[in-house]
Amino acid sequence: MNQHLSSYPAWRQSRWRAALWGSLALILIVPLIAMQFTTEVAWGSEDFLFAAILLGALGLAMEILFRLRLSPWVRAAGAALALFAFLLIWADAAVGVF
């Protein structure tokens, strides 16, 4: 199973991972900050839990995609598909499109 893992140096993986998880955490913190300045953003604890699970699933999908030895096109397509699924679920939860 180890032959499928990428051979990137550890420092590149740690920088990439830090950027990925840091940006996902920042996305989760933005509504918390917005709630301090406006009443239009009113998230409850269940909203933050849902967002954390959804963002965590996106982060795990991205991490798995970039750790496997796949062609760059397959990685890009998988990342685009994961991002599309994330945005579709987020939009449906926000306004109930489907």
Image: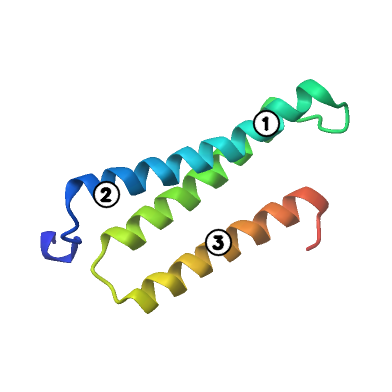
Earlier-in-chain disc, 1 versus 2: 2
Residue 38, image x, y percentages = 85, 27
Quarter containing the C terminus? bottom right
- Say if 10 sits above or below 41 in the image: below
> Which residue is more in the foreground, 98 or 15?
15
Amino acid at circle 3: Leu
- Does residue 20 appear to the left or right of 15 in the view shown? right
CB under 8 Å between discs 1 and 2: no
Distance of label 1 from label 2 (alpha carbons): 32 Å
Residue 44: in sight, yes or no?
A: no
Give SS at disc 1. Answer: helix
> Which residue is more in the foreground, 79 or 57?
79
Give SS at disc 3. Answer: helix
Residue 47, image x, y percentages = 69, 34
- The residue at which mark 1 appears reads as 46
- Does residue 8 appear to the left or right of 28 in the view shown? left
| Colour setup of the view | rainbow
- The residue at which mark 3 appears reads as 83
Mark 3 Cα shell of 10 Å, populated few (<14), some (14-19), many (≥20): some
Earlier-in-chain disc, 2 versus 3: 2
Residue at figure coordinates x 55%, y 61% from the top left: 83
Furthest toward the top, the residue is 36
Residue 94: in sight, yes or no?
A: yes
- Does residue 80 appear to the left or right of 97 in the view shown? left
Residue 45, image x, y percentages = 67, 26
Amino acid at circle 2: Gln
- The residue at which mark 2 appears reads as 13
- Say if 64 sits above or below 54 in the image: below
Distance of label 2 from label 3 (alpha carbons): 20 Å
Quarter containing the N terminus? bottom left
